[in-house]
Image (spheres, grey):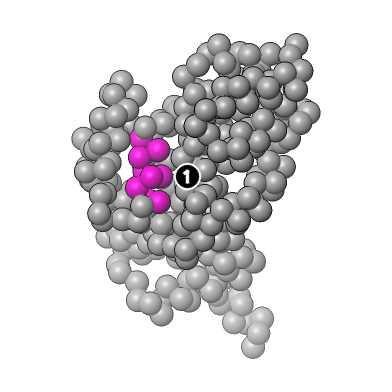
């Protein structure tokens, strides 16, 4: 997702980071405004076409965004989105995708500012796991024919007072703005962004039995040495798992037998 002129998403994220650090917990409001901008792009075909029109100059598009966002939007958000629209995006929907990602960065940064990012990441995972056996609830939260307000109210009822404010904001966004996605996988995706922000990989671990803390520490250490980065373990217990343990890091899937061989090889190397 990259513009051929103006700012790419990566450049916009880099430029936005000092703003988020300065905003502290106030970054939450910036994120919610960026979610509102994303919704406006998604809902207005004329606006999307105007901003995707290759015959319009970047300055003209930036002026249009400034006019649209003139009332009720923080000037930092206006400046950020104006930089984005100066780019020429490959697909009409890419601009909304970029704006949403910046919104997620902002909301997560607000949790980071008060030391709650790890808690939010864990709550997103636990929320998705709690819905595994709730087929009807998952369908409601992923049904784009259902009124978004009803879906959001469902999430409020499910999470209100039980999770961090940022976790609830992200979960509400995940169901209100489906954008062709399903609710539970979206929570997983946001959790990966949170882990990335903490400079950690996410390892989804499915175990046949509850792992002890010592076992978790050994597994985390092995994976961290293998990948060269800190690893966040998200553990699910499933007695039907063959071999006792299944670990997935991104596209890599490793079973317990392979992990054992890796551990044995390392012991032989250091002996």
Where is residue 11 drawn, in percent x and y? 72, 42
Q: Is residue 160 left or right of residue 257?
A: left
Q: Is residue 39 left or right of residue 262?
A: left
Where is residue 81 drawn, in percent x and y? 63, 32
Q: Which residue is mark 1?
A: 29
| 240 vs 205, nearest the viewer | 205
Mark 1 nearby-residue class (10 Å; few <14, some 14–19, many ≥20): some
Q: Quadrant of residue 245?
A: bottom left
Mark 1 secondary-structure assignment = helix
Q: Quadrant of the N terminus?
A: top right
Q: Main secondary structure of the magenta part?
A: helix
State which region is magenta.
166-175
Please give the name of the residue rendered at 32% of the width and 28% of the height, measured from the top-left corner: 148
Where is residue 216 drawn, in percent x and y? 42, 73
Q: Please, which residue is most extreme toward the front here?
A: 71
| 127 vs 167, nearest the viewer | 167
Please give the name of the residue rendered at 49% of the width and 24% of the height, measured from the top-left corner: 40
- In the image, residue 21 above or below residue 104: below
């Amino acid at each position: 997702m990259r513009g051929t002129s103006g700012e790419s998403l990566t450049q916009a994220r880099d430029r936005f980071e000092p703003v988020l650090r300065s905003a502290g917990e106030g970054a939450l409001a910036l994120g919610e405004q960026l979610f509102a901008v994303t919704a406006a792009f998604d809902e207005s075909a004329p606006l999307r076409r105007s901003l995707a029109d290759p015959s319009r100059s970047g300055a003209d598009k930036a002026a249009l965004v400034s006019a649209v966002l003139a009332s009720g939007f923080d000037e930092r958000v206006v400046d950020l989105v104006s930089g984005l629209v100066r780019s020429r995006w490959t697909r009409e929907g890419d601009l909304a995708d970029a704006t949403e990602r910046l919104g997620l960065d902002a909301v997560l940064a607000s949790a980071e500012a008060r030391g709650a990012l790890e808690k939010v990441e864990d709550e997103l995972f636990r929320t998705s796991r709690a819905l595994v056996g709730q087929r009807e609830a998952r369908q409601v939260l992923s049904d784009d024919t259902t009124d978004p307000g009803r879906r959001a109210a469902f999430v409020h009822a499910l999470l209100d007072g039980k999770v961090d404010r940022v976790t609830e904001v992200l979960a509400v966004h995940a169901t209100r703005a489906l954008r062709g996605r399903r609710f539970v996988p979206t929570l997983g995706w946001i959790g990966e962004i949170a882990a990335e922000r903490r400079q950690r990989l996410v390892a989804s671990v499915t175990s046949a039995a509850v792992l002890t803390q010592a076992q978790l520490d050994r597994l985390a250490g092995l994976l961290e040495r293998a990948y060269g980065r800190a690893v966040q373990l998200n553990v699910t217990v499933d007695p039907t798992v063959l071999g006792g343990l299944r670990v997935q890091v991104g596209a890599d899937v490793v079973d317990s037998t392979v992990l054992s061989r890796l551990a044995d090889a390392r012991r032989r190397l250091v002996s």
